[in-house]
Amino acid sequence: DAFIVKVSKGKALNAFIVETPEHALAAAKAADEAIARGEPLKPLSGVPLGMKDLFATKGVQTTAASHILEGFEPVYESTVSQKLWDAGAGMLGKLNMDQFAMGSSNETSYFGNVISPWRRGGGDNAPLAPGGSSGGSSAAIAARLVPGATGTDTGGSIRQPAAFTGISGIKPTYGRCSRYGVVAFASSLDQAGPMARDVRDCAILLENMAGFDPRDSTSLQLPVPKWEEHLSGDLSGKKIGIPAEYLIDGTPTEIAKLWEAGIAWVKDAGAEVVEVSLPHTKYALPAYYIIAPAEASSNLARYDGVRYGLRELAEGQNLQEMYAATRAAGFGDEVKRRILIGTYVLSAGFYDAYYTQAQKVRALIARDFENVFSMCDLLLTPTAPSAAFALGEKSADPIAMYLNDVFTVPSSLAGLPAMSVPGGLDAGGLPLGLQIIGRPLDEQGVLNAGLAIE
Ligand code: GLN
């Protein structure tokens, strides 16, 4: 019953698209029975989690928060969710998100925006964005409706919502978590990861989500390290780089102050701090907003009204007209914008000028990181250039919305592990996040620095 109360409390936040308390209850009962039989518990026995609605869950509606997938019930389970169930966890429900994970505020969802449980102080009661695209996950955890949730991160969708709501979230190295059964947005960037109240919970969840999967050709064939066992906030002997280019024009003073505080904390934990340079940083955002839509336009070609969810067909219409009507009705405005940008940059006349150029820039960005990681072990930056903004504040201005991803996108293009941890509050009492970026496969280093900061 507690589960049902919890989920219904969440209605005010619109964090859940589908509620599945019976799933969580079954996991809790299984845990009780194991205890009664004197059997050892599994790593997540009875833990009720939220699932971002991008993960295919067998027999439970999976929509990616889009009308075009409304009513779609997968006949299979995503590898990541299956691993969590195998570890004993249960599911409280499918969490709201930006449609097809495209957005930074959760306002592109077909099922309505999520409302952050946070409010600014000083009499300003404007409802705030929980960040995006994993905004249902961040809001549900911040409101204490779930102890942890899955997120996905293509250009910041785990880290930015974590920063906006005062929780932790890690995007592991590209390939750590299987993409099998995760609705595809931009396949060369998409990566699943955990969001939770603190770094230790993130480590525990990630251990139970990651691992090789033959059903994902980009899955890394490596064992899953014991991240939680080796967690340590002692950063002695570690060099932490501060990339000069992340101090962009117009950085609010409170973001600069947050960064200074983070630098002091990692020094207190024994780290040496060095200034480094990532010269191609300013090209990351434009490159991302070419590559991600290009891949999206290809991935989203499958939603044709034949195979999944929605079908719009009027009397006397032919197949082409059915495709067009279904896609026109099924996709939201931001999704259509991405498809149009994507098909444009991939078109014969513009491919070299945009797509090829963006791929070259991506290689330069990855090389920047490789270079600095010969001089330091980790990087410390702010997660986002602002605290949570008000709902509606940026929704009419896609460029302003895209600019919020400026600090999270570079490490996505390079496939690096990166995490956001709470770094304190701004003048209005809203949480701010600090980001730690690591070498490929160094989730341990990232988590340890996160533990030192939180
Ligand atoms: N905000 C970015 C975008 O809209 C990132 C989204 C994500 O990481 N899924 O593309």
Image: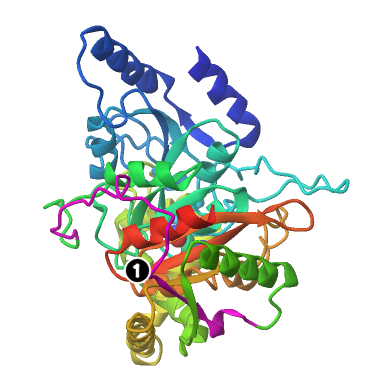
- Based on the displayed image, in which of its 4 quarters is residue 311 positioned? top left
Q: Is residue 332 left or right of residue 124?
A: left
Q: Quadrant of residue 187?
A: bottom left
Residue occupying image coordinates x 54% and y 37%: 140
Report the front residue among 391 and 39: 39
What secondary structure is marked by label 1? loop
In this image, 236 relative to 79: left or right? right
Q: Position of residue 333 (x, y in %)?
A: 55, 59
The magenta-colored residue range is 219-248
Identify the residue position indicated by label 1 in the image.
416
Our reading of the magenta stretch's main secondary structure is loop
Q: Nearer the viewer, residue 163 or 214?
A: 163
Q: How is the image coloured?
A: rainbow
Membership of 110 in magenta stretch: no
Name the residue type under label 1.
Answer: Leu
In the orientation shown, which residue stands out farthest toward the top? 36
Q: Residue at x 39, y 92 (%)?
A: 353
Q: Position of residue 123 (x, y in %)?
A: 88, 46
Vertical position of residue 280 compared to residue 206: above or below: below
Q: Position of residue 141 (x, y in %)?
A: 53, 38
Residue at figure coordinates x 54%, y 47% from the top left: 167
Instruction: Mark 1 and ligand 1: say if the CB distance to the nearest ligand atom is below 8 Å.
Output: no
